[in-house]
């Protein structure tokens, strides 16, 4: 199960995120999303857990918990919707 984790401290590492969820079950991956241009964390990430029951337990236990001085938001990640690539502003056709 893929889990969204928001309102993370900008100092949190992926290892710390993994350890936070590991007390509930096996974590298959933990990623903190970073800005493409600056490389700085954006304050949210995703955790994947092998067992759905363990993931649901982690969600209910961690949502709203203070971690690193911030109340984190934890819920099941929604599928990423297909988004068109930014092609820039639309221009009127030339005749």
Image (cartoon, grey):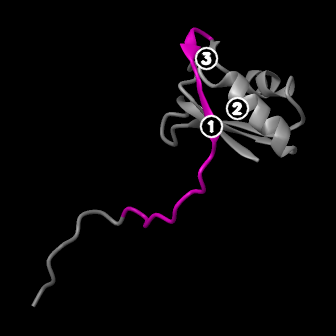
> Residue 24 vs residue 79: left or right?
right
Disc 3 and disc 2 in contact, CB within 8 angstroms: no
Nearer the N terminus, badge 3 or badge 2? Answer: 3
Determine whether 94 is above or below 51 in the image. below
Residue wearing tag 3: 11
Q: Position of residue 17 (x, y in %)?
A: 73, 26
Q: Position of residue 90 (x, y in %)?
A: 22, 70
> Residue 37 vs residue 87: left or right?
right
Within the magenta stretch, is there residue 12?
no
Q: Residue at x 70, y 28 (%)?
A: 60
Residue wearing tag 2: 59
Kind of element beneath mark 1: strand
In this rendered view, identify the residue nearer to me: 50 or 36: 50
Determine whether 21 is above or below 3 in the image. above
Judge whether residue 13 can be spotted in this image. no
Q: Residues within 10 Å of mark 1 (few under 14, many from 20)?
A: some
Q: Residue at x 78, y 38 (%)?
A: 55
Tell me the magenta residue range.
Answer: 68-86
Which of the 4 image quarters holds residue 45? top right
């Amino acid at each position: 199960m893929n889990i969204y984790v928001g309102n993370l401290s900008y100092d949190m590492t992926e290892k710390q995120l993994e350890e936070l969820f590991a007390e509930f079950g096996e974590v298959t991956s933990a990623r903190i999303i970073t800005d493409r241009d600056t490389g700085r964390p954006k304050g949210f990430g995703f955790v994947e857990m092998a067992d759905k029951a363990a993931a649901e337990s982690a969600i209910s236990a961690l949502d709203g918990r203070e971690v690193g001085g911030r109340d984190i938001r934890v819920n099941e990640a929604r599928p990423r919707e297909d988004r068109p690539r930014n092609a820039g502003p639309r221009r009127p056709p030339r005749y």
